[in-house]
Amino acid sequence: MSKSEAIAILDQTILRRAAIDAVKKLAPQKLVRNPVMFVTGVVAALVTLIYVRDAITGQEGLAFTGQIAAWLWFTVLFANFAEAVAEGRGKAQADALRRTRSDTMAKLMLHADDSRDDPWEPREAYDLKEGDVVLVEAGDTIPADGEVIEGIASINESAITGESAPVIRESGGDRSAVTGGTVVLSDWIKVRVTAAPGSSFLDRMIALVEGAERQKTPNELALSTLLSGMTLILLITVVTLWGIAGYSGTVLSVTVLVALLVTLIPTTIGGLLSAIGIAGMDRLIRFNVVATSGRAVEAAGDVDTLLLDKTGTITFGNRLATAFVPVPGRSERDVAEAAHLASLADETPEGRSIVALARGSYGVGTEIHAPTAVIPFSAQTRLSGIDIDGRSLRKGAVDAVLAGVGLATDRTPAVFREAVLAISKTGGTPLAVADGKDLVGVIHLKDVVKPDVKARFAALRQMSIKTVMVTGDNPVTAAAIASEAGVDDYIAEATPQDKLAYIKSEQAKGRLIAMCGDGTNDAPALAQADVGVAMQTGTQAAREAGNMVDLDSDPTKLIEITEIGKQLLMTRGSLTTFSIANDVAKYFAIIPALFVATYPELDALNIMGLASPESAILSAVIFNALIIIALIPLALKGVSYRPSGASALLRRNLLIYGLGGLVVPFIGIKLVDLAVSALGLA
Amino acid sequence: MTFQGWLEIALVLSAVLAAAWPLGNYMARVFAGDQTLLSPVLAPVERAIYAAAGIRRDREQTWVGYTLAMLALNAAGFLLLYAMMRVQGGLPLNPQGFSGLTPDLAYNTAVSFVSNTNWQSYGGETTMSHLTQMTGLAVQNFLSAATGIALAIAVTRAFARSGAREIGNFWVDVTRATLYVLLPLSILLAIAFVATGMPQTLAPNFEAATLEGAKQTIAVGPVASQEAIKQLGTNGGGFFNANAAHPFENPSAWSNVLSIWSMLLISTAMTFTFGRMVGDRRQGFALLAVMWLLLIAGTAIVYASEMAGNPLLAAAGVDPSQGNMEGKEIRFGQALTALYVAATTGLSCGAVNAMHDSLTPLGGLVPLFMIQLGEILPGGVGSGLYGMIVMAVLAVFVAGLMVGRTPEYLGKKIEAREMKFAVLAILILPLFILGFTAVAATLPAALSSLANAGPHGLTEILYAYSSAAGNNGSAFAGLNANTPWFNTTLGLAMMFGRFAYVVPVMAMAGAIAAKTKAGASSGTFPTHGSLFIGLLVGVILILGGLQYFPALALGPVVEHVLMLAGKTL
């Protein structure tokens, strides 16, 4: 993780601000968004009223009622506090982002096709409209999101990405999108504004990190439904208990019934639910990924299939020379020397990799006589070469070189033909090397798979996520790289339409697909995918189509995004299980306390040996409130996640949060009871 | 507990499994409309029924259509039965000349038989004419069971299908359930029951002179045929007031074994049908394992606590080796009585071969709690399966999140909509059980019906409402339920317990059916195997315990500790 790690989980200023916000969130219209806490708030108010009434009429047991009321309010406050802390971290980031946005002055061009030297008029960034064309020169801040329509510039995007290395933006192609708030370092560009003020990328990002637009995500909604349902069921249980207890002549006070209700309803998960969601989004943002919806973050946890572009994700961007194969009568070193000389004028990465391999592995010397002619590589000739010391050396595509030396393929040495075939079969690219009219050998160029991807794909397989490599290569090449990288499947000779079709067919089988892309032609697939991660360096169209933007433009991040999504769901599930399992101990604390006066024999259920009925009830309520505070760090950090199969995960989490949830409150309530009775509170 | 006792239990349960497996597979074929063994005989009958009723076999219904059809059939059944009972005095086949029923009793009984509860506020042999028994009550025994089976099949289809709007045709399902499953089995079972000594006659009651010279009326009637569907359809409404403890309704140890076997048969087989229809038999095995684990645990607790008996009685000189025999029949023995008690309440059958009122406090807590857990262990025919599916959906949702994915059950994502309906369904039982109990427990008009004071009286009220809302129908007894208050409120509990539960379940099924079914992977939450079985058991127990622990603590639990303290009989 990077950059904004500086905002620690429990930063002092955030805590202070959160404490104040926790009180503000007591407002009923805010509390009602969370049914469990709303119920808690209502009954807390009820017990407070009873306390006031009893205080006025001089009833007994005032201290008990007062303490219950206080702890009920603390329960709500602690839940509000958890949410406020989670939001606080986003707010701190939003403040930083907002500072970059303020008071930018734009240079508005009067006509879209004006040249750089034509006059412009100054205009507040806020007043720019979609379609306006502005000039941005070295040192200027780009006033709004837009597309470069003319020029090229290096730009510092650290305001958005936190990355200070400049990036190049130019008109045309896939690097034409610029973001408001970033700074042009050199040269100039003409930018057509594509987002109205207030809806720019930066604006949306601020809104997102602040949580202002936060809506409940689908799974959060489903979980809230369950929690509300459980609250209702327990409300029935508690309300009817009044009548059922009345049968045996036990009169239960509203205070103890409320205490029973609040300890039983799932306040722990209810109090932490929104904090978990906010923290999940926040974790992504600290990972430099901006999700435009919480739905996408959840979907990331469900992803079944990852579509990965080969180039740049699985392999290094370019093919590299890895071996020289000589024809009979020549040595590897001969091939290396010839290839080295022939590639000196080849400025492509492939050419440079040949030079590097010859020098590095074969010790080919660097002092060169003056050449008589240099043939630079071109896409038309598909070869490069050099005429030097009376030799005429060429290297390039096999058919191009053979045509150059006037050899038919079937007249070439068998070794040569076999080498060419073998290299092609394994997904490599063979290049022929010729010296005059003689073939010298073959250069093996291949896509080099990044060193760590195989392990990452293995981890994904453990998470049961299928990896699919997408490449424009022919099927033979694709298969070879696929097997080397350890992906599960590949799409060869892929067009953007193929990608889209593949996504649709997988989705029809009920699978969720994640992909990343940067080009305009990726946009339909990005929009179709359940999780579409657009690269920050990509085009505006791609960024609009995806539901996440990776500010670091690192395609391998899909893996971490998936993990964050899973962690979010796991945290919810674990705390729900914990919360429900807690109820068992609370029953054993409260039920004997309620009825021991009527049936002294029921003390047999008081297996914790709590000091007195009042102390038992109070201890359960206090434990119930404190557990929320105790679990805030877990809710914010998320439960730990290791890639493994569902069964192993379930077993582990059931053990920790299910069994733990059964056991912990027995110990916790007993400890609180010891403290309560030692302090003489009840 | 004795080894022989457990051997008896094991043998009966094995016999259930042995018959349920082929029956389950047979039902899967029946509801898929495939050719079966009985098709040559029954297919023409089936076609004739559809032709007469104007049913298009190939026209399937959405969940709304299916549910409305189900409600229409049951409403019609209710009205017919109500009318018949009101006017039975003027109808034929009434050798004892019984008069029509009071409105509240007729309402209560009609709801009771339509909802597969078979709660009986009356004594059968002193209230119902043969016509009412055979064409009223018995018909509803068939239809309510067939309704349950049809609903369970529809819910199963929802999980089996992908992206579907329709979940079957109710009329076809209910016809097939009756024709291919319930009728043939009932005929065979009735003959077997006659062989064990059950009467099957239309003759009136006769009088016998006892040894002391007194006259005794011996009630008879078409008992065996009534008994067959009563057990098979988990109805439980007895021909006689004493139900399966009556010597004509359950004459011997053999008829007792056959009764237990037949009431467990279809509900057990449904889990196999389920596994087969969703294309993964292990899914059915897992649900069955959960049902039977809890059923056997319940049996063990009843068996153990009845054998332990009451220390006060032992102190008074009663031979403790037989355990608590009060209210039990010597011909059945402790082991098979314990199994009967657990099975009839784990199922929503409600037939009884012992007085549940006379069980020890813990022995009485088990049947009560098994009803409150939602009649899913293994539950009524059909209703047990869809009830268990709701619990599985809840369990998958809570724990499924812990594997880091949106929870899925059988390849269907469980989201807000499904959750809403599942939660609505599970709200019904506590609302009616606890709500009415709380009111009755403080209402003098209701309390006057009680035979016992103290915690036992509370248990009697709690049991009555649990039995009604859970559509069980067994009575704890000790409570005079034939009063306007109880007839009305119990009737409401039965009606809502059945139909207010089913409608959200069907809505959930509709939402599930429409979802695309995703294939399983190693990242999918596994819903078979011991981990899931353990989880589902835990969820059922905790969820049930949360709702009923306080009430149970004040009833059987406190009674138990009082008994141990030597303070109560």
Image (cartoon, coloured by chain):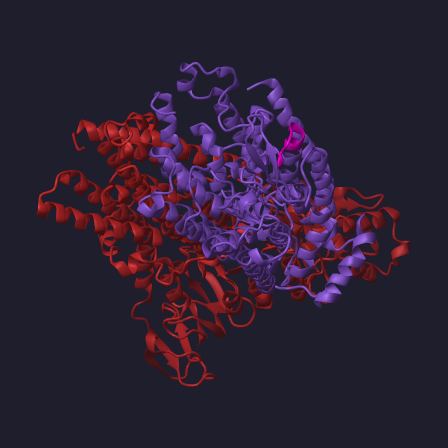
Chain colours: A red, B purple
Q: Nearer the viewer, residue B461 or A617?
A: B461
Q: Which residues are magenta?
A: B248-257
| Residue B555 position in % (x across, y down) | 37, 34
User: Considering only vertical position in the picture, is B503 above or below B321?
Assistant: below
User: Considering only vertical position in the picture, is B395 above or below B361?
Assistant: below
Farthest residue to the right: give it: A411
User: Considering only vertical position in the picture, is B63 above or below B348?
Assistant: below
In magenta segment, residue B250: yes
- Kindly indicate the quadrant of the structure image that contains residue A328: top right
| Residue A589 position in % (x across, y down) | 31, 32
In magenta segment, residue A130: no
Residue visible at 32% across and 79% down in the picture? A122
Q: Nearer the viewer, residue B524 or A493?
A: B524
Q: Nearer the viewer, residue B503 or A215?
A: B503
Farthest residue to the bottom: give it: A111
| Residue B102 position in % (x across, y down) | 47, 55
Visible in this render: residue A346? Answer: yes
